Image (cartoon, helix red, strand yellow):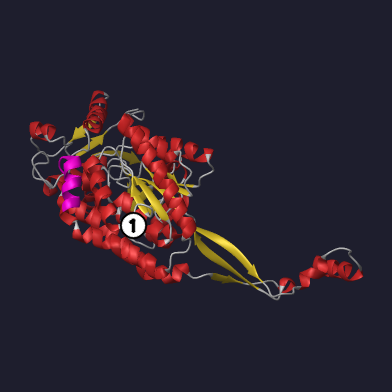
Amino acid sequence: MSDAESKQIERMKSSLADQKSAFRADRQRSLAERKADLAKIAKLCRDNVDAICEAINKDFSCRAREESIFGEIVFVINDAEHTAKHLKTWMKPKRVSVPMNLMPGKAYIRRDPVGVAGIVAPWNYPFQLAMAPLVAALGAGCRAMIKPSEYTPATAELMKSLIGQYFDEDQVAVITGGPAVGQAFTQLKFDHLFYTGSTQVGRLVAKAAAENLVPVTLELGGKSPAIVTANYPFESAAKSIGWGKLFNSGQTCVAPDYVLAPKGREKEIAKAIIEVAQAQFEDAGNDGSYSAIVSDRHYARLNTMIEEARAAGAAILQPEHDAEAAKAARKIPPTVVLNLPADSKLLEEEIFGPILPVLGYEDLDTATDYISDRDHPLALYVYTTDKAEAERVLDRTLSGGVGVNINLLHLSIPDLPFGGIGASGQGAYHGETGFEVFSHNRSVFHTGKWHPSRMLAPPYGKLIEGLAKKQLK
């Protein structure tokens, strides 16, 4: 461990102590204070659009400005403003009924902030996936510490600077650093730990948090399938799937990871997707609107997966492109793969890149069985003109979220919980669900100075015996 990392670890321990102390001194931030916090987030976004886009572009070496605006900045603004709009309702105590045998009295549930939240953000949407959980934490009245990914250092440093301008460090702090700092961060005794990233690392995070009995939310990944049924126009499906797969060059946790098409028509849908890619990007290698792969390591991994599939006899389809320019820019051209062996890495690992296997299925039940035989995906997409078919897919599968005749955009609806299940995650957030993540449902039963329960104390007599018999009837 370097001296810089040791200093960062000491700093974050100090920050946690300061935030816990500040929270104890001010446990219940008012509605006005919380709305002001959320307004700061929206202002931070609007006032720094260019700086945010430039930092993300620097980290990726090429990230389409529009993808950063819509996929990161606008998303956070909408989330903050939606939360502020509904916060008064979410904060209200919820009255519940009191059974007759426990009257008189009133019972209600308070939504109290849990305290200090730890937020671990990934590299693929480095701004949004740090700030959206922060919106939920601030809305709930919590304080927060954020650990951005070391793979996007420019964005991490910018967030640290901007957060420092808008918030005191005893309310929101950003901790930068490498894997050693990240590991130490997950071992801190937060009141809630929120992690977004890979399933593999998620297991380690859950173990680290368990040592301190820290509750966790795990937003993980998984292989999200897209089923195209025979009745759905393939050209329309290709446009939707192609857009969702190629946004941020497939470096999206809910991007379609493979396509299930009617057997015998796999090549038809594959060619349609390639045509969509060619129409969107005249030359992926030289097109500034086609995002690069985030790192040399990830680029090499994706290329290896393609070459292993090619060596195993798979058909590799790509639109026309300047291969040398693409390599120099660290870009993987849009790639559709046919005839994959079942043990291919492209079918076993989450791809997280612009590579899309297409598989054939005999009938709809065969397709849903294929999905159900594997870990539950973070997202599932079905393209069909038959509502009964869509319901059949929903009935026979389980996933974090679903898009019917669309993909990706379900996570942009604030009132829809976003999260996985099983290997694709634990817990969800966005909207009121995000507010609940960082809130404790605190039960309260309030009576007057005297209550009939006083009569239940020993020594028990005939009156209590009669009451017991009555209760047991």
Indicate the position of residue 86 as horizontal and vertical percent values.
39, 69
Give how far across and how far down residue 81 sits, in percent. Answer: 31, 66
Tell me the chief SS of the magenta region: helix
Q: Nearer the viewer, residue 286 or 146?
A: 146
Q: Which residues are magenta?
A: 51-62
The N terminus is located in which quarter? top left
Q: In the rendered image, is residue 374 in sight?
A: no
**Percent position (x, y) of residue 211?**
53, 38
Q: In this rendering, would 130 be left or right of 239?
A: right
Label 1 secondary element: helix
Find residue 436 and report its horizontal and vertical position in percent: 47, 59
Q: Quadrant of the C terminus?
A: bottom right
Q: Is residue 381 above or below residue 322?
A: below
Q: Who is closer to the viewer here, 148 or 352?
A: 148
Return the residue nearer the eye: 272 or 27. Answer: 27
Question: What residue sits 83% from the left and 64% below the top?
Answer: 457
Q: Residue at x 51, y 61 (%)?
A: 112
Q: Which quarter of the figure has residue 435?
A: bottom left
Which residue has dot 1 on it? 410
Residue 371 quadrant: top left
What amino acid type should be assigned to the residue bearing mark 1? His
